[in-house]
Amino acid sequence: MRNAAGHNGVKGWRRVILCAVTIAFSASMLAVTAGGSMAQAGELEIKRGKVIWNNKSNCNKCHGWAGDGKGHPRSPSGPSLRISELDRETMHEVIACGVPGTNMPHHDRNAYTDGRCWGLTKDDLDKEMMPKMGNKPIRAAEIEMVIDYIEARMKGRGKVTLEECEEYFNKVGAKGCANLPKLADLND
């Protein structure tokens, strides 16, 4: 059966249905991924998260390269992310909004302008309570990559190991790694 355009009507409808199913599936996966509840981060997102962690936001200065709270000596100590029990949504808000009254800066350019951060605005906070702006603003997608990196390389891990250190610095025998225990020694 051909339609007015000369195409086979059955094949055309199959394509339309296949297209609709593909779009619906893609949209549902995008929604799940955006919510962070189902999709696992790929290695690319984790690598990008590490770059943002180190360079754009300088999280390593306070939280340490391993997320253990042992950052730069001249920076305030950040909590260990290795033992954090925060879920993705809360981590996102902490990174975007900082934590009032602490050294955790905000990284959302529009934090405290419209109530998006903890339901507060600048007018609600004393100067001492207002989180400072982080090194550079970070977009929501970049915050998600930082969280991907934290979840893949830090959260839920025990002591920092030699292997982790060498992987982080991408060098066997990296300076500063030698005194760390080997993973096999921790499992004994």
Image (cartoon, helix red, strand yellow):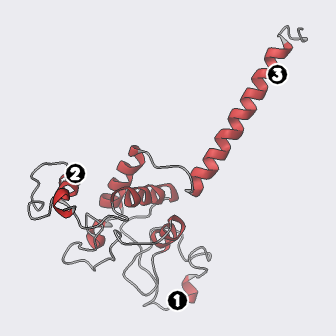
For disc 1, the marked residue is 125
| Callout in the foreground (1, 2) | 2
Residue 22 vertical position relative to residue 128 in the rendered view, above or below: above
Q: Residue at x 34, y 60 (%)?
A: 53
CA separation in Å, label 1 and label 2: 42 Å
Q: Tag 2's secondary structure?
A: helix
Assign the C terminus to one quadrant of the image: bottom left
Dot 1 surroundings within 10 Å: few (below 14), some, or many (20 or more)?
Answer: some
Q: Amino acid at mark 2?
A: Glu
Amino acid type at circle 3 is Trp
Q: Quadrant of residue 157?
A: bottom left
Q: Position of residue 97 (x, y in %)?
A: 49, 73
Q: Earlier in the sequence, mark 2 or mark 3?
A: 3
The residue located at (50%, 64%) in the rendering is 88
Q: Which residue is mark 3?
A: 13
Q: Residues within 10 Å of mark 2 (few under 14, many from 20)?
A: few
Q: Position of residue 158 (x, y in %)?
A: 29, 67
Instruction: Name the residue located 23 percent from the left edge and 56 percent from the top edge.
Output: 164
Marker disc for residue 102: none
